[in-house]
Image: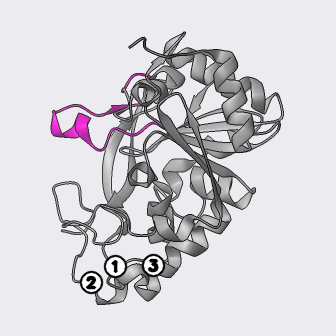
Amino acid sequence: MKETIVTKKFLKAGFESLGVTRDMKLIVHSSLKSFGCVEGGADCVIDTICEILGDGGTLMMPSFNHGEPYYNGDIFDVNKTPTTNGIIPETFRKRKGVLRSINPTHPFSVWGKDKERYTKDHQKYDAFGIGSPLYRLMEDGGYCMLIGTGYKANTFHHLVETCEASPCLLPKGEVYPVKLYDGTVADAHTWSWRDGICPINYNPIYPPLMKDIEKRVKIGNAEVILYNLKKGYDVIASCLNDGAVGGIKCSDCKIRPRVCKWSVDK
């Protein structure tokens, strides 16, 4: 059977039918291989999204390393440390005109009209809390697009956990050295990750409740989802606070933040 080739024209039609529009503020989580075969690879996907958004739009992608440099005796370098989020975010990170926020473990890469504002001073705020790049995107009416990843890759639920004060996460709980744009080294904080597996978000239980606020389309072999962040916040917060869909409430959960060599207060 002949493999379907996903072209730029096909991508553009699919994204636009989903609801991606000019001047939109958008975060994208992605799996390139989920499409099947894309003519032009990761660059084609990025180019297509940027062209739809236009000069007035903003595109954000995760640029996380999940602490890998520190486990390997290195430190986060905002200019060089690769992302562990896949080929599309890594290709995006290295593009001319893309800025990267400074956070030891969970920085974001941003292109477009508001890239300076969304990446500025991330090290002074929580990884995902108030003032973070993703929080600012939500407050500005932003959207999230999940390309072939499903909701497990939806790191927006970490923002909801942080803002709702889930007891398993400790904002600003760990401090690491980081290499800045000018090559100097400074300390920057990030959150303390939970010392256990979340019963709500590890294999997320909230997706059935997203049906009323999301749109879905098939592009090649990939199922692509689009939803408004503010509306998504309300859905996820209900799961955390009320135990929706049979899940345990955050207030009843015994999992707490980890303690490690980088913890501020061991």
The reply to whether the C-beta atoms of the residues labelled 1 and 2 are less than 8 Å apart is yes
* Residue at image location 34% in from the left, 71% down from the top: 200
Q: Quadrant of the C terminus?
A: bottom left
- The residue wearing badge 2 is 253
Foreground disc of the pair 1, 2 = 2
Percent from the top left, x then y, of residue 189? 39, 54
Which span of residues is magenta-colored? Answer: 62-81
Q: Is 179 on the left-hand or right-hand side of 60? A: left
In the image, residue 183 lies in the stretch drawn in magenta:
no
Q: Is residue 257 above or below residue 69?
A: below
In the image, residue 69 lies in the stretch drawn in magenta:
yes
Percent from the top left, x then y, of residue 6? 55, 18
Foreground disc of the pair 1, 3 = 3
Q: Mark 1 vs mark 3: which is more N-terminal?
A: 1
Most foreground residue, 265 or 31: 31
Q: Give me the C-alpha separation between circle 3 and circle 2.
A: 13 Å
Percent from the top left, x then y, of residue 143? 67, 51
Q: Give the crowd class for mark 1: few <14, some 14-19, many >=20 residues within 10 Å.
A: some
- The residue wearing badge 3 is 239
Which amino acid type corresponds to the residue marked 2 in the rendered image? Cys
